[in-house]
Image: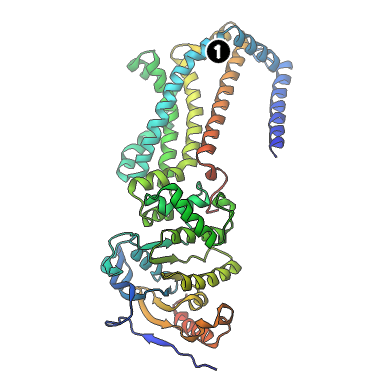
Amino acid sequence: MLSRSLYLKILSAVVVFGAWEIAGRIPVSYAFPTFLESMAALGRMAFDGTLYTAYVETLKPLVVGVSISAFIGIGLGLWIGLSRAFDWLFSPIFIVMQAAPLAALIPLLVMAYGIGLTSKVFVVCIMAMPVIVLNTAGAVRNTPVSLKEMGRSFLGSKSDIILKIIIPSASPVIFSGLRLGISAGFIGAILAELKITPTGVGDIITYSRSIADYPSMYAAIFSIILLAILFLNLLERVEVYLFEGNVRGYASD
Amino acid sequence: MVMPQIKEVAGQAGESPVDNAVVARGVSKTYGTVEALRNLSLEFPRGQLTSLLGPSGCGKTTLLKIIAGLLEPTSGEIEVNGKPVKGPGPDRAFVFQDFALMPWASVIRNVAFGLELRGVAKSEREAIAEKYIREVGLSGFEKAYPHELSGGMRQRVGLARALSVDADVLLMDEPFSAVDEQTRRKFQEDLLRLVENESKTFIFVTHSIEEAVYVSDQIAILLPRPSRVSEIIRPGGFRQKGADAIRRDPEYLDIVDRIWASLRSYVD
């Protein structure tokens, strides 16, 4: 079974990259390089260290922003889910944040916090936090009543019920919020580098485009997607490790 | 042919010599304007199985949850072993209709969860859990997760969890309603054996007349809106005849018919 799913993954990669290669060879546009050209550029940048220095720069706001979003987001989400008053107070902020056109807000952030790391971290947080908060809150609120009653009837304390029942029960939705939030955080990090100051991977993209080095530009975009996928896979492993029984189905279905 | 011997006890019995594990006195419960229970009094003799039987919406689950301490009565009180109930306690354990198993936890952790919440050390609680897993016939499934089990097996886990905390009173909220008919019959037979072997008091909510008559020492029939105990039936001689003979016993069939006759007008 495992080899079959691996086979399917390879097959879908071959189909996508093959289509890319063909589209580049037609060519769809002079600004669209082939897959092999892009991979060659990726290899070149990986070996001469460009990519490494770029990622040191890009990962700073990304890691800081995603960590803040994850910790504060899950904390706030728990609180919002557990308390009705908190729900009224905070949910609207995150719903607005989720719907806000971020690109239009960036000039405001720059005015307030300058062009440094702070603004970029803010952009990542605005992208990543709402979905984490709202998913966590929704999952906590929808904890099956009978599980909570079970905890109470077997003499669980309030903190027992939160730690041993509500959080594990909400974990699948919390993790799916984290997955969405982190992918949005990746988008936010690149957006910040394109819109605020070109540094890191954003700089490679902007610079390569300005000198018409399209293979490098697409290689940079490809690398960030690859990193995001690797990171999301890691997150999935963590989830399986922590809540094994949750991942494959539910007692109620 | 033995004549049916149906002993009837009036709604509120006076001082009886019977040892009651649980007593409900004048319990009322209103949700907003809806009156779920009105001035309900009922006694649950120790070591016996009492069924709460009635049409849906008659407040039988509400009463069970009040006894469990999960809901507060609007007025009246519950006594367990002579002490008034103020909340959940170690003297009662609950078996849930939807099993209420934690899907992220293995069978053994689910069974040991009541002990875990009581702070029993891991090795000790797992030893106890293993014993009850064996008792409900789930040996070999200790490491399985709930989603890998059938409905009937899941409820066995729920039952083992309730047994493992060694409470005096077992509260069962329609425990067999979510399992298939054949499993259900097997469960009912197992339950009879359990009542006989464990010296526990069972309070059993059901909407199945046959099930109530089959498993109960005492059946309290609740009528709806607002709920009150309309009568108490104590099936007599057929219980000693063995699990197989009960369903063919004339007294069993008579009681089933009689209960249906009194409930039929409340079913819409």
Can residue A144 be seen in this snapshot? no
Q: Is residue B227 above or below residue A3?
A: below
Residue A179 at x, y percent in the picture? 51, 33
Q: What residue sits 57% from the left and 27% below the top?
A: A229
Q: In the rendered image, which quarter contains the N terminus of chain A?
A: top right
Residue A103 at x, y percent in the picture? 44, 22
Residue B82 at x, y percent in the picture? 27, 70
Residue type at mark 1 is Ile
Residue that carries the numbered disc 1 in the rendered image: A205
Q: Is residue B228 left or right of residue A244?
A: left
The chain that hosts pointer 1 is A
Q: How is the image coloured?
A: rainbow
Q: What residue sits 72% from the left and 19% below the top?
A: A21
Q: Is residue B21 above or below residue A79?
A: below
Answer few, some or many: residues within 10 Å of disc 1's Cα (few below 14, many 20 plus, some between 14 and 19).
many
Can residue B163 be seen in this snapshot? yes
* Residue A61 found in image quarter: top left
Q: Is residue A117 left or right of residue A1?
A: left
* Residue B16 found in image quarter: bottom left
Q: Is residue B152 left or right of residue B102?
A: right
